[in-house]
Amino acid sequence: MFHNRVTNVFFDLDHTLWDFDKNSANTFQKIFNEQNIDIELHDFLAVYVPANLKFWRLFREEKITKAELRYQRLKSVFDELDYPTSDEVIHLLSEEYINHLSSFNALFPNTIEVLNYLRPKYKLHIITNGFQEVQERKLRNSGIYDFFDQIIDSEMAGVKKPNPIIFNLALKKAGATPECSIMIGDSLEADIMGAKALGFYTIHFNAHKEKKHDLSPIIYDLEEIKSFL
């Protein structure tokens, strides 16, 4: 569908290539064991996963700071589960979570296969709302860093997707135009709508099993990218 139009492929990282939920769960299991947090991981994650998405949305909308995101997403969960813990422990867990998250390196199925397929044909790039200090370690530790020509994060851009500034910075660094570029990501708002507003082609990797829509092609396995590119 996009074979003769696209020269540059831009990927989101978390929830698109790097399996955030699996790696996050493994990280929490490690730090809970180390810090003697007596709580069932399944019960914690059932509350944490939607809370994390909520606070990330607020962060993306510039309504909370990075420090507030890291604190509130844990504080709110412990409060809801009625698990007593101090601010000191929450700050420690938050720090340990960031320190250890990138040491777990699960990728979505077919990530390496698809990147190997795309690399000879297109220039590949990352546009991520994640924190610069963590995202490079994720890419390097999971073995996919060298696939990408440009890695643009929200701290570098000073704004977060879907703000057009981060997409324009990515295009400038890649030496690309929207008409020859495609964005592949899991977030309808940040990745798909943000990129489409500038004229990118888009593919929605429906990692969260959202309802079908007509905004862009939808895929459920990264291998499906081969049918578009």
Image: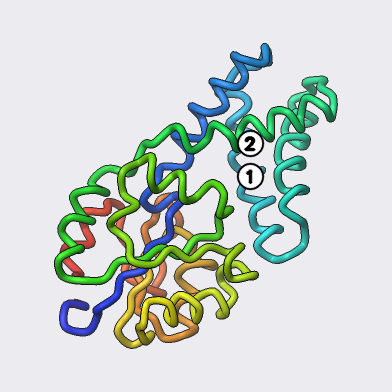
Q: Residue at x 34, y 52 (%)?
A: 145
Amino acid residing under circle 2: Tyr
Q: Quadrant of residue 180?
A: bottom left
Looking at the image, is 23 positioned above or below residue 192? above
Judge by depth and name the residue closer to the eye, 81 or 33.
Answer: 33
Locate residue 217, reporting x and y percent: 31, 69
Q: Residue at x 39, y 53 (%)?
A: 16
Q: Which residue is mark 1?
A: 52
Secondary-structure class at tag 2:
helix
Q: Residue at x 37, y 77 (%)?
A: 174
Locate residue 127, reporting x and y percent: 46, 65
Q: Residue at x 73, y 28 (%)?
A: 92
Locate residue 183, reporting x and y percent: 38, 70
| Spatial CA span between label 2 and label 1 | 6 Å
Secondary-structure class at tag 1:
helix
Locate residue 119, reporting x and y percent: 20, 63
Quarter holding the C terminus? bottom left
Looking at the image, is 1 positioned above or below residue 146? below
Q: Quadrant of residue 73?
A: top right
The colour mode here is: rainbow
Mark 2 vs 1: CB contact within 8 A: yes
Q: Quadrant of residue 28?
A: top right
Q: Which residue is mark 2?
A: 48
Amino acid residing under circle 1: Asn
- Mark 2 surroundings within 10 Å by alpha-carbon count, few (fewer than 14), some (14 through 19), many (20 or more): many
